[in-house]
Image: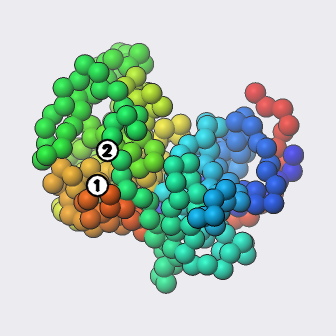
Amino acid sequence: MHIRFTKMQGAGNDFVVLDETRARLGLTPAQYRFLADRHFGVGADQILSVRPALSPEADFGYVIHNSDGGEVEHCGNGARCFVRYVREHGLTDKRVVRVQVRHGVIELAEQPDGRVRVNMGAPMFDLARVPFQPAGMTPVAAHGWQLWPLELNKNPAFGQSHTGFAATINVAVLSMGNPHAVHFVDDVEAAPVRTVGSLIETHPAFARRVNAGFMQVLDRSHARLRVWERGAGETLACGTGTCAAVVAGIRLGYLGPQVDVQTRGGLLTIEWAGGEHDPVHMTGPAVTVFEGEIDIPDTLA
C-alpha cells in the first residue's frame, strides 16, 4: 500500500498524520507499528488519523494509535497538531475546530502567536472511569484529596533490577479521557522514569494500563515534567499527561490555576479553575516537520 503522510511535532512529541477524510486506509495494528518504527518506517510516538465526524457537534473525527499499534482515547499534543494539519491542508478555514475523540468532543483554537490552545475537557476523578481498582490499598489523605500507595513489587515485572527503588510510591490517579498516575518528585531529572514508569504503566490495578507522570514543582506557577506513556515509553512531552499532572498539583495545593510546565520537548501552559466540571486548557506549539510518501507492506507480523 502506497500512502501520503505528514510528519508533525508538538513540544517534541512527534506524529505521523494521515488524511482519511475521503476513505479509510484500513491499516492493521502491525501497519501502524511499521509507520511508527524509527528504523524501518517513518518514526513517531503516535499515528493520528483525520476522519469525517460521526456527530453533528464536531467538524472532524480524531483517532490516535500508539507506536505499539493500539488505539488510545486521547492525545493532547496531537490535538494541537491536528488543527494545524487540517488548516494547512485546506480541510477547513476555521480557526476554532471541534473534533470528536472516543469520549466526547474537544475544541482546538489556533492563536495569533502561532501556538494552539486546546479545550481538553474536564478531568475525571471517578476511579472506575479511569479505570483504577485500588483493592487492598488505603489512600493517603492530602489537601482534601487522596494519594494511592502503589506497591510496585505487586507487578509481575518487578525484579532484581528494581531493588534500588522504593517498593511503594504514592500516586494521584485521574483521567483526562485516558488514564494517568502522577508521582511528585524532588528532582525530575533524577527520577527513575524508564524503570519505575514501566512498572506503574503495567501495574495490575490499572486494567487498561496507565500513563505515568513524574512532576517536580518549582513554584506555584512553574513545574517540570517527564512522562512514561502507555504503549510508547518515555516521550519528549505528553499533553494529557501534562494536564493531569497540573490538575493533580492544583488539587493537592501545590500549584495555582495557570502553570507553565517545562517538558523535555518544550513549554506547555496549562489552565484549570479547579472545579470538578471546569475544563482544562492547554496551550503549546504545533509544527509541521515534513511531508512524504511511503510503501507499507501488506503483510506484517
Mark 2: amino acid: Phe
Q: Which mark is residue 101?
A: none
Query: Left of 267 or right of it: where is 92?
Result: right
Front one among 19 and 216: 19
Q: How many numbered marks are there?
A: 2
Residue 176, image x, y percentages: 41, 50
Residue at 18 percent of width and 50 percent of height: 252
Name the residue furthest bottom.
112
The residue closer to the viewer here, 50 or 61, is 61
Instruction: State the SS at label 2.
Output: loop
Contact (Cβ within 8 Å) of mark 1 with mark 2: yes
> In the displayed image of the protein, which residue is found farthest to the front?
56
Neighbourhood count class around disc 1 (C-alpha, 10 Å): few under 14, some 14–19, many 20 upward = few
Locate residue 296 relative to residue 122 in the image: left or right.
right
289 relative to 39, above or below? below
Of the two numbered discs 1 and 2 on the same chain, state the one appearing first in sequence: 2
Residue 251: x and y in percent read 21, 52
Q: Which residue is mark 1?
A: 276
Give, as a three-letter code, the residue at label 1.
Glu
Classify mark 1: helix, strand or loop: loop
Q: Is residue 7 above or below residue 142?
A: below
Q: Quadrant of the C terminus?
A: top right
* Circle 2 residue: 125
Task: Answer left or right for 117 relative to 93.
Answer: left
Q: Residue at x 60, y 64 (%)?
A: 58
Q: Position of residue 153 (x, y in %)?
A: 31, 18
Between the residue at mark 1 and the residue at mark 2, the CA separation in whole angstroms equals 8 Å
Q: Position of residue 297 (x, y in %)?
A: 84, 39
For label 2, count other residues whose C-alpha is less than 10 Å away and answer few (under 14), some (14-19) or many (20+).
some
| Residue 11 in sight from this viewpoint | yes
Instruction: Tell which of 103 and 287 is nearer to you.
Output: 103
